[in-house]
Image: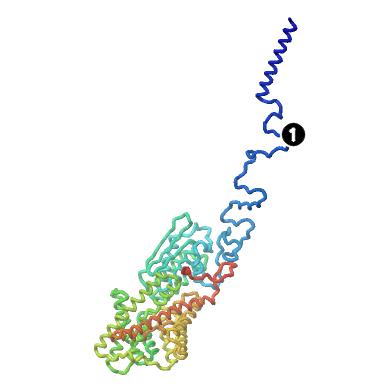
């Protein structure tokens, strides 16, 4: 009983142990091999690890394909990338055409003989982002340029230049040169016919400073104009020219009196009319008659100016006495050329200076200023037409013998005409209030202009318009070279020299035909006069541009390309 009972107990214990072991085995295997149902048997290689342990991008390049180059690391916009050699060149052939060098845009450096006009015009034609930094170094005791005072000085200088008849591009170049010399590099001057403005922005995050000035009065004083040019040259070329000294010089220029008295201007106007009458075939009695008529017209214009009348009525008053003198000689029957007398008086009134400036502004891209100048010329010519037509119509009513068929007598006397042309240029220089040392050059330039015109028109039988263009082109060429040699404006050497080329006779015959009711003939003569006037203006501008071919063009250091074109747009 006892042994059986023990066996029964042991059997029960073994069975319970087996049951417990089976339950434990079903819950978690104790063996390493039984860890996972996916464990491969011995001898089979392990599969690659799952992707969760090594995540990859869906943009990863598959095996076997060439990988793209790694992108450049982000850096400063003012530092060229590694391996790129820096240098001063820009544009075609540059080492870093798409990057700004660490030291900024290279400075434009010119030879010592280059005038400020070329330097400033070159930078003015650049976009503001490509302009070089100012060469003037700030002094240690200065915090920086006084922007409002610099802008005021810039506007005052531009006002004197524009009132003196200077072209819009040269006025902008002078304004930019003054502002640039005093450290205002981000500066934009703007010139119209009566309004000057300049804007300066210290940086891209600062508010701009803008100032403007209106030109109320215009005067003809080339002595003052030359003094302003010398002031701009001193400001742009000297590093220690202070604002106080510039203001002092500017005040002295404004206080300076005209170099010639009023009576000298009246005598010069009479001599100009007399010389012009001899150019078109008159003799000495005609010379004195034209001189007297022109001087009477000058005094009458002074009287109208003193009464505050506009310039239009001043021209009407100045045109009447020369025409009345010609009508009186025709009625008296003394045998003098009335046509030459009236033509000589018109030479002193035709606004050649304003016409040349207007066409020059149009050719250089300042169309608003050019349109305003040409409109001014149109008004002045209409004033001359009104004055002359009034007198001619009255003379025809009195049965004056004014025959448009009898053209001005063409005589072959080259020596007399050359002397008359030089006298005309000399007296024109006095009327323009030029400096005495420029009068001789302007006189010689006028003589050269008439010699070239006579050789082409009279000897070679070249049409008058073409001959006038060539002669005016030489005037502009020599005037521009003389101005660069003297570091001065070209107007004193050019304006007086074109006097012998002015279309006085064509204007007179056109007005006479209109007074007689012959519209076709009158319009034909006036059209010829307009063509000659435009030929003068275009020829002068062409000569100015041709002169720059002989000058050393300003350019960037190391740059081999030529001068930047003045054309701002290409028309498409």
| Residue 225 found in image quarter | bottom left
The quarter of the image holding the N terminus is top right
- Give coordinates of residue 111: x percent, y percent: 56, 71
- Give coordinates of residue 2: x percent, y percent: 74, 5
Work out whether 37 lies above or below 342: above
In this rendering, position of residue 499 left or right of residue 61: left
Element under disc 1: loop
- Single out the residue that lies furthest toward the top: 1
Work out whether 149 lies above or below 429: above
10 Å crowding of disc 1: few (<14), some (14-19), many (20+): few
Whether residue 488 appears in this view of the structure is yes
| Residue 516 found in image quarter | bottom left
- Give coordinates of residue 272: x percent, y percent: 38, 85
Whether residue 103 appears in this view of the structure is no
Work out whether 117 lies above or below 147: below
| Residue 135 found in image quarter | bottom right
Which residue is more in the foreground, 520 or 268?
520
- Give coordinates of residue 227: x percent, y percent: 45, 73
Location of mark 1 (residue): 42
Which residue is more in the foreground, 183 or 8?
8
Q: How is the image coloured?
A: rainbow
In this rendering, position of residue 399 left or right of residue 261: left
């Amino acid at each position: 009983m006892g042994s059986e009972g023990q066996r029964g107990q042991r059997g029960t214990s073994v069975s319970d142990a087996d049951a417990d072991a089976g339950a434990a085995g079903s819950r978690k295997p104790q063996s390493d091999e039984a860890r996972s149902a996916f464990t491969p048997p011995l001898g089979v290689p392990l599969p690659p690890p799952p992707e969760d342990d090594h995540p990859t991008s869906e943009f990863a390049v598959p095996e076997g394909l060439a990988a793209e180059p790694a992108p450049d690391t982000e850096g400063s916009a003012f530092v060229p990338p590694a391996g790129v050699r820096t240098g001063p060149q820009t544009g075609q052939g540059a080492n870093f055409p798409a990057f700004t060098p660490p030291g900024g845009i290279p400075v434009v450096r010119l030879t010592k003989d280059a005038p400020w006009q070329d330097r400033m015009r070159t930078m003015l034609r650049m976009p503001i982002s490509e302009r070089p930094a100012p060469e003037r170094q700030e002094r240690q005791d200065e915090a920086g340029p006084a922007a409002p005072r610099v802008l005021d000085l810039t506007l005052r200088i531009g006002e004197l230049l524009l009132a003196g008849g200077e072209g819009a591009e040269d006025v902008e170049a002078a304004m930019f040169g003054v502002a640039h010399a005093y450290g205002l590099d981000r500066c934009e001057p703007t010139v119209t016919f009566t309004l000057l403005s300049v804007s300066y922005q210290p940086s891209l995050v600062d508010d701009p400073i803008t100032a403007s000035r209106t030109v109320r009065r215009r005067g003809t004083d080339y002595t003052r104009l030359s003094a302003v040019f010398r002031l701009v040259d001193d400001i742009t070329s000297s590093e220690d020219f202070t604002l106080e000294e510039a203001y002092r010089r500017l005040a002295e220029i404004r206080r300076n009196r005209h170099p010639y008295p009023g009576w000298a201007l009246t005598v010069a106007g009479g001599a100009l009319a007399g010389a012009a009458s001899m150019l078109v075939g008159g003799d000495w009695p005609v010379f004195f008659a034209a001189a007297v008529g022109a001087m009477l017209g000058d005094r009458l214009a002074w009287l109208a100016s003193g009464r505050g009348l506009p310039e239009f009525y001043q021209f009407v008053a100045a045109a009447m006495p020369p025409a009345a003198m010609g009508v009186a000689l025709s009625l008296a029957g003394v045998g003098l050329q009335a046509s030459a007398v009236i033509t000589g008086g018109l030479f002193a009134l035709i606004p050649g200076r304003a016409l040349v400036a207007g066409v020059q502004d149009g050719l250089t891209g300042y169309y608003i200023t050019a349109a305003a100048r040409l409109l001014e010329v149109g008004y002045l010519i209409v004033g001359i037409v009104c004055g002359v037509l009034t007198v001619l119509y009255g003379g025809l009513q009195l049965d004056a013998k004014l025959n448009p068929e009898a053209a001005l007598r063409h005589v072959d006397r080259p020596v007399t005409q050359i002397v008359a042309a030089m006298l005309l240029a000399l007296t024109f220089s006095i009327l323009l209030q030029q400096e005495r040392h420029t009068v001789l050059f302007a006189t010689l330039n006028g003589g050269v202009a008439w010699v070239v015109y006579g050789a082409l028109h009279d000897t070679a039988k070249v049409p008058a318009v073409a001959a006038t263009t060539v002669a005016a082109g030489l005037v502009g060429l020599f005037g521009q070279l003389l101005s660069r040699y003297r570091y001065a404006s070209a107007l004193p050497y050019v304006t007086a020299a074109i006097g012998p080329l002015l279309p006085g006779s064509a204007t007179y015959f056109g007005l006479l035909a209109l007074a007689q009711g012959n519209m076709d003939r009158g319009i034909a003569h006036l059209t010829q006069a307009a063509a000659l006037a435009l030929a003068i203006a275009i020829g002068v501008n062409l000569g100015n541009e041709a002169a720059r071919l002989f000058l050393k063009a300003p350019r960037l250091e190391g740059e081999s390309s030529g001068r930047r074109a003045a054309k701002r747009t290409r028309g498409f």
